[in-house]
Amino acid sequence: MSSSPKKYAEGIHKYSQHRLLSHTRDACEKFLYQNEKKNFDIEIKALKNDLEKSDNDEDTKNILLKIKKLKDEFSKHSVHITITYSNKNTTARTVRKNNGFSIVIPTPNFESKDSITEARSLIAHELGHIVMHTKELLSAQFNRGSYELNSSKMEEEANNFSMEILNLKKDYYKKVCDERIFH
């Protein structure tokens, strides 16, 4: 995926408000699914084009098997993102799970607005990694538990995503509140 944090955040925000999903996390799951669906559709279309051009039975059989395998793989495809709270001394991280990811953050003090704001920022940052760095997270080196991204560019992208998604949500809710007050 090669796009800016703002573009990713806008895509997630679009699903969050237009699909009436209750959480940005749900919107991220939907966004990732839609991206995979686009890739799936492109691959299927290419294979169907190859099928039309195929002039022997062996090639036709192999292409049909590839289509079936791709459809089977996609039918099992889903990404689930969970948010888990851990002890106060833990650092925020994303853990790879069988069919998705778990964001682990320190348990916030739900009585403190600052603590809740920090938790939202940590979650948004980790969602940025999941959305923008999916391929890296799914690669073999990250498949066992937590990952460490050594790239300052990836950290900067996740930080920018976090700021963008939180600003979009803030602007959206301000607009909704203004419309309710003034209309």
Image (tube, rainbow, N blue to C red):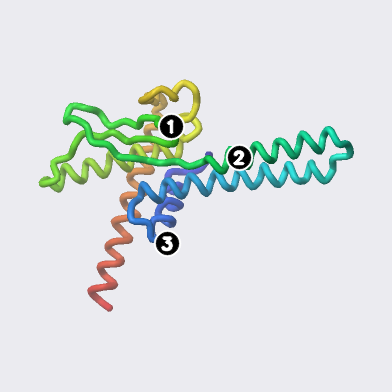
68 relative position to 161: left or right: right
Residue drawn at point x = 36 percent, y = 25 percent: 146
Q: Nearer the viewer, mark 2 or mark 3?
A: 2
Give the vertical position of 183 relative to 147 (above or below).
Answer: below
Q: Which residue is mark 1?
A: 98
Q: Looking at the image, which is closer to me, 48 or 120?
A: 48
Kindly check if marks 3 and 1 are in contact, taking CB atoms under 8 A apart as contact.
no
Tag 1, which secondary structure? loop
The answer for how far apart the CA atoms under marks 3 and 1 are is 29 Å
| Badge 2: residue crowd in 10 Å (few <14, some 14–19, many ≥20) | few
The answer for how far apart the CA atoms under marks 2 and 3 are is 30 Å
5 relative position to 170: left or right: right
Between discs 2 and 3, the one toward the N terminus: 3
Q: Looking at the image, which is closer to me, 52 or 89?
A: 52
Q: Which residue is mark 3?
A: 18
Q: Which residue is mark 2?
A: 72
Tag 2, which secondary structure? helix
Q: Name which quarter of the figure residue 96 lies in.
A: top left
Q: In which quadrant is the C terminus drawn? A: bottom left
